[in-house]
Amino acid sequence: MRDPRGLEGAEGAAYVVGWYRRGRNLIIGDIADEVARRVERAGSAVSGAFLEPTIRLGVTGLSRAGKTVFITSLVANLMNRARMGQLRAAAQGAIRAAYLQPQPDDTLPRFDYETHLAALTGPAPHWPDSTRAISELRLSLKVQPTGLVAGLRGPRTLHLDIVDYPGEWLLDLGLIEKDFAQWSRETLERLENRPQAEAFRAALSGADPAAKLDEPQAQALSAAFTGYLRAAREDGYSDCTPGRFLLPGDLAGSPVLTFAPLPPGEHGRGSLGREFARRYEAYKREVVKPFFRDHFARLDRQVVLVDALGAIHAGPQAVEDMRRAMGDILGAFRPGQNNFLSQIFLGRRIERILFAATKADHLHHSQHAKLTAIMEALLSDAKRRADYAGATTAALSIAGLRATTEDTVTHDGRALDVVRGVLLEDGRRAAFHPGHLPEDPAHLLTPARQGAPAWLDEDYAIMRFAPQPLSLKPGEGPPHIRLDRAAEFLIGDRL
Ligand SMILES: Nc1nc2c(ncn2[C@@H]2O[C@H](COP(=O)(O)OP(=O)(O)O)[C@@H](O)[C@H]2O)c(=O)[nH]1
Ligand SMILES: [Mg+2]
């Protein structure tokens, strides 16, 4: 891996970050306060809300893909729309007001917008704590039609119900049509050559699926398997089912989460093999299906956030794995070929799906189109494989919160486009060039598909940047990359 810090130098220290301007500008903390006050005032104003048009927008992606940052910044930028030029209704002034209201679902945790916004935009900005379950937030938009009909119609209200849920849960859909034997076979095949699975393989080799169930042994196997899933996830793999093993919530330690894949074989009553198969079925019935029925089937629009740069950094196998995961995810939006989904969707369907590569602020904009091209290639491949028809789809590269600024430096005698930011680990300023993405996505996707162990002619680095202190002008939300385009695609047609 290239050491990106090699680019750091005197010019790095002297650099003045463009939007880091203190002074008369409004601090966004004030906006957060105003938001909180408005929520209080709104009180129980939900009565009759069901008569008003509503869009349920699902936001998903594997953990650390950037969901919390995306939602927080999207909402802040819908309330303060100066940076939303590509959202037509915002540019034309059709959105008169945007305010938070009590959400329609009383039993879902509320997305903790104020806390996350304070983390990102307060005086000592930091990334929000990671969330590990589903949550919801209602943003209501008062819209006054513009153009020919402007004078004829009064303003109307559109409720945007944003539902944040882990992508790990979405991938579990693939389990519904698989029995324990098939899931075990596929999972064991995949982990055969992965170093992350060493401890689990060792635990498995000492286990006899035909032997009588021994609960401590079951727990040890399950713990070793969970350890593998966690390590694989860390290293950029996406195919980590069962998803609740990674994000157990209040199910931690329960039998539905205490199993692991086993080698094939018929096993008698009371055996480890029989019991694990039973628990796997219980997991599908008690955990997976209720989520899809109660939450997933009610969505109208969906954005899937993907840390594509992270996968590219991790290498060809992680990219291949991301490609397959995107196909599996898209499959979940195509109820026609899945009995269970057809039953729960009852003929309605998700209308628009956006696949967005996050953290595009790690790249100089001269490389954004290449990242988008990679996402588009992955998406069209996923559509082809899923024989996909139905929802309108799109691919974008975005950043929920821009933590870097752009610059061009001379390196080894040639001009190099870099981004600059403050490193999360030690607070140093650094200029960063993650590597040259190829003009043609196939240069990444083909070696990935062929199982190449490493990239041939380029290394891709990654680092984590800290969010920067902001001072925003009145009307401005936090700096982002293409959130306005994302919003235009996801809800623009209804504004
Ligand atoms: N530079 C940058 N980093 C981001 C951005 N969004 C997320 N991140 C990083 O990714 C981490 C996970 O983001 P988060 O929104 O909590 O992910 P979630 O688990 O999907 O909700 C954050 O702590 C940041 O380090 C972004 O727009 N720019
Ligand atoms: Mg989150």
Image: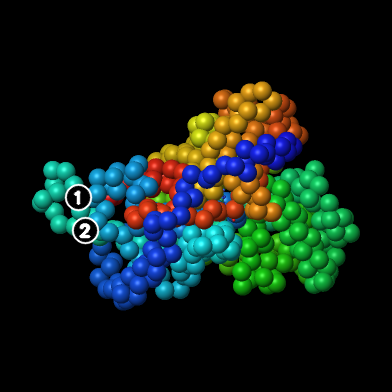
Residue lying furthest left in this view?
152
What is the spatial separation of the Cα atoms under label 1 and label 2, in whole angstroms?
A: 8 Å
> Which structural element holds mark 2?
strand
Task: Give the residue type at disc 1.
Answer: Pro
Q: Is residue 44 visible?
A: yes
In the figure, residue 431 lies in which quadrant? Answer: top right
What residue do we see at 60% from left, 55% from top?
63
Left-right relation of 287 to 231 = left
What residue do we see at 58% from left, 63% from top?
129
Number of marks present in the image shown? 2
Residue position for label 1: 145
452 vs 82, nearest the viewer: 82
440 vs 299, nearest the viewer: 440
What residue do we see at 14% from left, 49% from top?
150
Left-right relation of 49 to 316 = left
Where is residue 378? Give x, y as percent. 55, 35
Residue position for label 2: 156
Residue lying furthest right in this view?
206
Task: Give the residue type at disc 2.
Answer: Arg
- Indicate the colouring scheme: rainbow
Point out the image quarter for the N terminus.
top right
**Is label 1 within 8 A of ligand 1 (CB to nearest ligand atom)?**
no
Q: Is residue 489 visible?
A: no
Where is residue 24? Give x, y as percent. 38, 57
Q: Please report contact status of discs 1 and 2: CB closer than 8 Å, yes or no.
A: yes
What residue do we see at 19% from left, 57% from top?
155
